[in-house]
Image: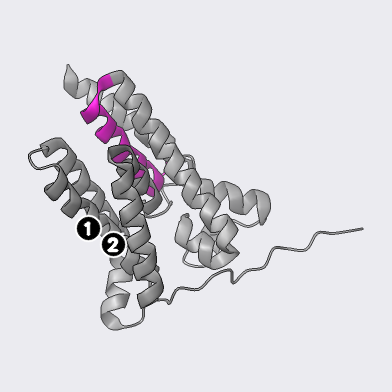
């Protein structure tokens, strides 16, 4: 019976993951489809690069919150493991949303939401470290991948023996690596895009 509960909570998370902050903000505020600018990814980094800090932060917060809500509901219904299932479902729903033809983001903000629900202090530490690393090396992808790797390491150290949490952390790590596979190739070749902010200006309004 539990397997069906966990599957249902995974699908609940997937449903929440389909709420695409980047797409909504880019269409409503910038009158552009985020998938047609920059890297084409419907996520925080592309919003940050394409439309600036404000929309980048709003995108991150929106994607984080949707995962927090999904995990909270799943925990209330089915407990700890159900929450992990919803968290992973939200990441997958964000990366491959059926509402956008399975073309979404890379799931880092959603992973941050899952980490927040596991341990807020862990999330704060990993987030701060990831941002600082990204600024120092100049690559957001490096900071993101370091953050999800740090999640796995922290789980091993802080929660030894918590197999369901470790499985969730490893799943989030694998999804992040897969989502950043092209970035990893570019990093190896030395052609990865440097961190830049707000290349596209807000369109001017027609005053006529």
Q: Magenta stretch mostly in which secondary structure?
A: helix
Instruction: Please state, as top left, top right, bottom left or bottom right, where the C terminus lies in the image.
Output: bottom right
Q: Secondary structure at mark 2?
A: helix
Give how far across and how far down residue 183 sits, in percent: 33, 69
Instruction: Please state, as top left, top right, bottom left or bottom right, where the N terminus lies in the image.
Output: top left
Which residue is rendered at x = 58% and y = 64% of the image? Answer: 52
How far is the residue under mark 1 from the one under mark 2? 6 Å
Question: Which residue corresponds to mark 1?
Answer: 149
Extreme residue toward the front, this view: 121
Note whether residue 178 is visible: no
Residue 169 drawn in magenta: no
Extreme residue toward the left, this view: 161
Q: Secondary structure at mark 1?
A: helix
Give how far across and how far down residue 198 sits, in percent: 58, 68
Label 2 neighbour load within 10 Å: few <14, some 14-19, many 20+: some
Give how far across and how far down residue 41 sits, in percent: 45, 59
Q: Nearer the viewer, residue 78 or 17?
A: 78
Which residue is rendered at x = 36% and y = 53% of the image? Answer: 108
Q: Could you tell whether 129 is left or right of 158 in the image?
A: right
96 is higher (above) or lower (below) than 196: above
Note whether residue 175 is visible: yes
Q: Could you tell whether 80 is left or right of 62 in the image?
A: left
Q: Give, as a single range, the part of the protein colored magenta.
A: 78-98
Give the number of the disc on residue 145: 2
Q: How is the image coloured?
A: one colour
149 is higher (above) or lower (below) than 183: above
């Amino acid at each position: 019976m539990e397997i069906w509960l966990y599957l249902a909570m995974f699908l609940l998370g997937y449903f929440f993951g389909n709420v695409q902050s980047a797409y909504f903000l880019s269409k409503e505020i910038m009158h552009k489809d985020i998938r047609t600018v920059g890297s084409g990814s419907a996520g925080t980094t592309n919003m940050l690069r394409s439309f600036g800090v404000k929309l980048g932060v709003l995108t991150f917060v929106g994607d984080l919150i949707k995962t927090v809500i999904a995990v909270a509901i799943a925990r209330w219904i089915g407990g700890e493991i159900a929450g992990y299932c919803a968290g992973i479902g939200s990441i997958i729903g964000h990366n491959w949303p059926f509402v956008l033809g399975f073309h979404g983001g890379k799931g880092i903000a959603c992973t941050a939401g899952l980490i927040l629900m596991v341990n807020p202090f862990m999330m704060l530490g990993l987030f701060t470290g990831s941002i600082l690393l990204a600024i120092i090396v100049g690559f957001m992808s490096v900071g993101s991948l370091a953050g999800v790797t740090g999640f796995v390491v922290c789980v091993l150290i802080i929660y030894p023996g918590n197999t369901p949490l470790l499985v969730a952390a490893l799943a989030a790590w694998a999804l992040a690596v897969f989502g950043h596979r092209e970035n990893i190739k570019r990093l190896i070749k030395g052609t990865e895009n440097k961190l830049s902010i707000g290349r596209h200006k807000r369109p001017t309004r027609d005053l006529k």
